[in-house]
Amino acid sequence: MSRVVSLLLGAALLCGHGAFCRRVVSGQKVCFADYQHPCYKLAYFQELSSRVSFQEARLACESEGGALLSLENAAEQKLIESMLQNLTKPGTGISDGDFWIGLWRSGEGQASGACPDLYRWSDGSSSQYRNWYADEPSCGSEKCVVMYHQPTANPGLGGPYLYQWNDDRCNMKHNYICKYEPEIKPTTPGEKTYFTNQPEDTHQNLVVTEAGIIPNLIYVVIPTIPLLLLILVAFGTCCFQMLHKSKGRTKTSPNQSTLWISKSTRKESGMEV
């Protein structure tokens, strides 16, 4: 019960008074400062080409010591919804895009009656909590689960396509949400930790950690190395040519310099006599 209350308080803090609305951004790890609750990370990609399949999302979370999101109860679902609301607040440029969670099923048991019972969590959680959209899961070839996040879509029979779950083909490209064990302090270089310090935050129990900054920079820098090398070569060539031309303008022969000085000196001497 205390866990549920803490999660609900966390959701309230994320929304209340704007204390954390400006801090929850894509790629940040959000933790509880009591170090007794899981941490989360929302990975949103505005470019559709950058979104990933279920297996890619699963490997990305596991490579950082976490797992794709598993949800234990309605309170944890509410907390994730609050984070998504803060992530997509007006002015951020973030809009539609579903999120992979860690629920999936194997290819066995295609019968529609047995299908919903075959779903399991990739992190081994035994949670039976479900939040399916109306008429889901549809089963068939759709074996992996996303959390709907389509705020601009027209509502369907089950209402807006927001935060309910839908089964999808595992090779489809989506955003994803990671879940981590509680941690005492950031261990990855480049991480920054923020504690609630607003006067209105009476329950200072949330901390936001910027995670994955350096790895993300690597993904940006590596593809640009050939372009950077080309720019350096072009810059070096221009500098060499400018230096060569500069030497050509200032270099004069000793004979020419002496002859000019000599003529000027003689002329001045004759005028004095």
Image (cartoon, rainbow, N blue to C red):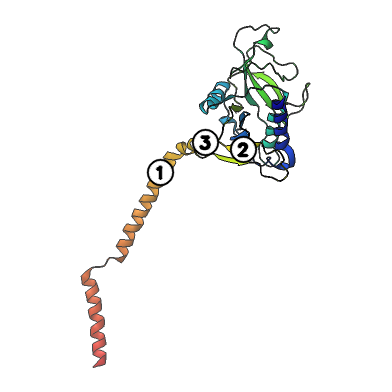
How packed mark 1 is, by other alpha carbons closer than 10 Å (few <14, some 14-19, many 20 or more), is few
The image quadrant where one finds the N terminus is: top right
Q: Which residue bears the numbered disc 2? A: 208
Instruction: Tell me the residue at 56%/25% (across/down).
Output: 57
Would residue 152 be visible to someone looking at this image? no
The amino acid marked with disc number 1 is Leu
Q: CA distance from mark 3 to mark 2?
A: 18 Å
Question: Which of marks 2 and 3 precedes in the sequence?
Answer: 2
The picture places residue 47, in percent across and down from the top left corner, at 59, 33
Q: Which element type, helix, strand or loop, lies under badge 1?
A: helix
Question: Which of marks 3 and 1 precedes in the sequence?
Answer: 3
Q: Are marks 3 and 2 in contact (CB under 8 Å)?
A: no
Q: Which element type, helix, strand or loop, lies under badge 2?
A: strand
Q: Which residue bears the numbered disc 3? A: 216
* Discs 1/3, front: 3
Which of 102 and 1 lies nearest the eye of the viewer?
Answer: 1
Instruction: Tell me the residue at 25%/76% (across/down).
Output: 260
